[in-house]
């Protein structure tokens, strides 16, 4: 008898099949002497939509809420039904005696396989492959130590509990809000607290009151010295204090009081997990979280040059260390080739800074695979992301940057002044910055999530300082007062919003330490795999919009926060759920008790929404009427442009007015918008530049570069397709896989 192995993705399935010697190809599976390997495409089965339970929920009405089926059913996802049938057929083969679950080692991975098996109704012995990486060695070791699937029954129950809770709370709250206010409104355990964080940031910015701060610079012996207060700050809020200091020290002689010289080291940044990669890609290239994930998926599945992208770990497991030389060889592309050659001349060791089995949960950090590729084979976005992964990987393998820092302190009229000098002795990992610049990757400083409430002055200079000796006299021949204003926190970008979702503790009103700890340990709001979809959904439902690179609430988003049940606007709900789900997985709590609590909560939130006297007001009505139902249309700012949509959620009419494109203005080089219809379509730019689409195509064709006619045609077809998609048909938008 053979064993059927069920993997989560085709790429992982093929890796397992290769190791197990399954070479005979089938349609959606591979077969060998002892094993048959098949795979899902992520989830193949999901919770059934409300309409499947009966006529009462096919129409959205408040009288039929809350929706509380006695048992939540599951259904095959239509989009991937063909692969489900393939897996089901293999499970029912007479020569298959047991099933081996080889989906991702985690809660959701357990759910993927178990739901397929449950829906198929197969009753065969089950085992579990539990590995944290998919190297040949890890796969072989895992198959030699297969676990009994019963050991993971509680984990499966926790996964089902999470999915059912999101269905009950998310769908009921969304339907209640929508029918109460006859508008396309939605809320959920993750998306609504995310909106609340954006609102809190906007409130902080609005309420921020800038303070003027002052500093003092003094010139002496060819060096610019920086004044320091008693608490070692380079500034003060007292202008009078700085004025008195300036009067005292101008044209006065100070004495070198202290000279400190230290040999320092700076270490390479951690390897990428998905969130940190999305943050850097957004800062450096303006890629959205969804774009970065899409590029990563193509690099992982199609090109096979990076490891599994949906990871929340920034470390490797020990078994990966032996494969590092081969991975470095695969990185010998473009500007990275000489550096890779030098790294390979010495043995590559796994430093504790990036190798730690205990810090890897389901998947290790994102690194290149052993398979190389020519950069010319990659699209622009794919190449930029691949180079980011290579850069971070090689940086981790390089030694620390070694430098010498010298700080000289002068005492003048009782006031302290200092200057620092920095000499790089061995660049170490910072050598990668030069290569990144050559490759067109310019590292940027991380944006702070809080305002500059404690300003300071910079007193460090790159390079060596003049020779100083203790007791040396320094004449301050010239002084200059500096001043500035404290700045409010910046609005969120996608990069900083991802960081806030990952660590939302500061946005919790509750001071419960256990809740905060749980939220930190479970990765915050959403998962690395779902945060991009959550942000995208908020854009697509017009609850947030982007101005330049910054994210702002729309009127709709702000009103949804006011209309949503209070419990759904805070990360605390997620923290409490995760505490209870962890207890279910450990056998410390029962799924039925959690479910009973969720059902009670669902009833309460529907009652709250139904009884609310609050109203929803469209403040973006136009004078244009919907051609389908005659009601006035709304003008909304989509993530990539503007469109008209019908205010009646049941109508669903939409029309694109303009779309931000990748075409660059020939005058100011900013991205242009495409507006109009048919032959009258034209590109417009904020600088005032205008150009017909036909003229643009002709210019690009003559120049032999930029966007081809084929690309424009492809883009236009995509835009037409998006225009046809409903904003909020009864189930698709509300459920939308409910990646909460």
Image (spheres, rainbow, N blue to C red):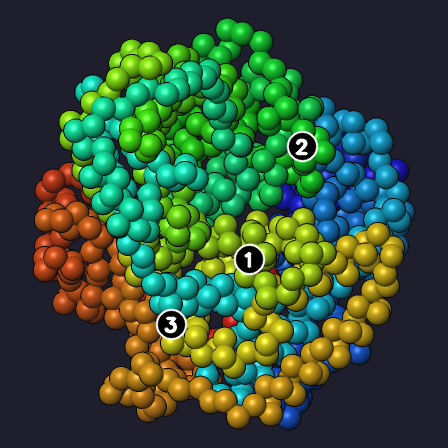
Q: Quadrant of residue 75?
A: bottom right
Depth check: give the residue in front, 164 or 731. 164
x 71%, y 63%: residue: 576
Which residue in the protein does label 2 denote? Answer: 134
Measured Cα–Cα span from mark 3 to mark 1: 23 Å
Horizontal and vertical percent position of residue 5: 76, 41
Q: Nearer the viewer, mark 1 or mark 2?
A: 1
Q: CA distance from mark 1 to mark 2?
A: 36 Å
C-beta proximity under 8 Å, tags 3 and 1: no
**Circle nearer the N terminus (3, 2):** 2
**To which residue does mark 1 refer?**
506
Q: Quadrant of the C terminus?
A: bottom right
Badge 3: residue crowd in 10 Å (few <14, some 14–19, many ≥20): some
In the rendered view, does 86 fall on the left or right side of 432?
Answer: right
Disc on the earlier residue, 1 or 2: 2
Residue 471, above or below 666 = above
Looking at the rendered structure, the secondary structure element under dot 1 is helix
Residue 524 x/y as whole percent: 60, 54
Q: With respect to residue 678, does 613 lie above or below?
A: below
Identify the secondary structure beneath mark 3: loop
**Drawn side of residue 280 relative to residue 152, left or right:** left
Q: Position of residue 684 (x, y in %)?
A: 15, 60
Q: Which of labels 3 and 1 is toward the front?
A: 1
- Badge 2 marks a residue whose secondary structure is loop
Q: Which residue is mark 3?
A: 554
């Amino acid at each position: 008898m053979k064993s059927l192995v069920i993997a989560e993705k085709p790429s992982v399935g093929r890796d397992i099949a290769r190791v197990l010697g399954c070479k005979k190809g089938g349609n959606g599976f591979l077969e060998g002497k002892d094993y048959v390997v098949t795979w899902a495409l992520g989830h193949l089965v999901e919770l059934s939509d409300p309409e499947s339970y009966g006529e009462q929920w096919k129409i959205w009405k408040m009288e039929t809420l809350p929706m509380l089926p006695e048992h939540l059913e599951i259904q095959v996802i239509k989009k991937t039904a063909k692969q489900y049938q393939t897996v089901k057929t293999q499970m029912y083969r007479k020569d298959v005696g047991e099933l081996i679950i080889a989906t991702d080692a985690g809660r959701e991975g357990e759910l993927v396989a178990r739901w397929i098996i449950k829906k198929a109704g197969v009753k065969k012995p089950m085992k579990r492959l539990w590995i944290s990486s998919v190297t040949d060695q890890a796969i072989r070791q895992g198959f030699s130590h297969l676990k009994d699937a019963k050991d993971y029954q509680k984990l499966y129950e926790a996964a089902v509990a999470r999915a059912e809770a999101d269905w009950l709370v998310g769908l009921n709250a969304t339907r209640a809000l929508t029918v109460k206010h006859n508008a396309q409104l939605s809320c959920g355990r993750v998306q609504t607290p995310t909106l609340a964080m954006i609102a809190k940031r906007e409130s902080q910015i609005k309420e921020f009151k800038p303070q003027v701060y002052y500093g003092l610079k003094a010139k002496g012996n060819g060096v610019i010295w920086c004044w320091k207060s008693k608490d070692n700050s380079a500034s003060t809020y007292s202008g009078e204090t700085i004025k008195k200091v300036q009067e005292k020290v101008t044209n006065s002689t100070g004495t070198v009081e202290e000279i400190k010289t230290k040999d320092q080291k700076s270490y390479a940044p951690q390897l990428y997990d998905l969130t940190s990669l999305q943050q850097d890609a957004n800062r450096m290239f303006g890629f959205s979280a969804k774009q970065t994930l899409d590029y990563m998926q193509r690099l992982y599945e199609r090109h096979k040059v990076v490891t599994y992208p949906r990871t929340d770990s920034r470390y490797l497991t020990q078994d990966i260390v032996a494969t590092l030389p081969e991975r470095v060889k695969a990185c010998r592309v473009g500007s990275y080739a000489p550096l890779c050659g030098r790294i390979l001349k010495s043995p590559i060791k796994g430093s504790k800074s990036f190798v730690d089995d205990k810090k890897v949960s389901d998947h290790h950090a994102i690194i290149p695979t052993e398979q190389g590729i020519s950069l010319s084979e990659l699209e622009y976005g794919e190449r930029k992301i691949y180079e980011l992964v290579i850069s971070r990987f090689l940086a981790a393998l390089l030694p620390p940057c070694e430098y010498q820092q010298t700080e000289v302190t002068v005492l003048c009229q009782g006031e302290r002044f200092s200057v620092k000098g920095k000499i790089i002795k061995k660049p170490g990992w910072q050598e990668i910055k030069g290569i990144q610049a050559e490759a067109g990757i310019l590292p940027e400083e991380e944006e702070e999530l809080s305002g500059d409430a404690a300003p300071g002055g910079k007193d460090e200079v790159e390079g060596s300082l003049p020779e100083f000796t203790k007791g040396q006299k320094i004449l301050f021949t010239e002084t200059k007062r500096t001043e500035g204003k404290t700045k409010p926190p910046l609005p969120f970008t996608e990069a900083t919003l991802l960081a806030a979702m990952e660590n939302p503790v500061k946005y919790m009103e509750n001071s419960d330490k256990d809740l905060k700890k749980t939220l930190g340990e479970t990765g915050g709001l959403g998962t690395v795999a779902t945060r991009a979809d959550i942000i995208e959904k908020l854009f697509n439902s017009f609850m947030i919009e982007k101005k330049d690179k910054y994210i702002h609430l729309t009127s709709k988003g702000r009103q949804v926060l006011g209309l949503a049940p209070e419990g759904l606007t805070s990360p605390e709900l997620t923290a409490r759920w995760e505490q209870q789900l962890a207890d279910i997985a450990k056998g410390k709590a029962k799924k039925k008790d959690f479910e009973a609590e969720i059902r009670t909560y669902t009833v309460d939130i529907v009652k709250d929404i139904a009884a609310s006297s609050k109203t929803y007001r469209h403040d973006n009505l136009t004078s244009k009427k919907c051609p389908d139902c005659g009601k006035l249309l709304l003008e909304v700012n989509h993530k990539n442009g503007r469109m008209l949509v019908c205010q009646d959620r049941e109508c669903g009419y939409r029309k694109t007015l303009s779309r931000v494109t990748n075409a660059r203005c020939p005058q100011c080089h900013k991205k242009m918008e495409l507006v109009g219809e048919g032959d009258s379509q034209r590109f417009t730019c904020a600088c005032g530049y205008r150009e017909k689409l036909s003229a643009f195509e002709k210019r690009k064709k003559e120049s032999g570069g930029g966007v081809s006619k084929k690309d424009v045609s492809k883009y236009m077809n995509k835009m037409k397709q998006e225009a046809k998609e409903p904003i909020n048909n009864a189930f698709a938008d509300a459920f939308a896989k409910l990646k909460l």
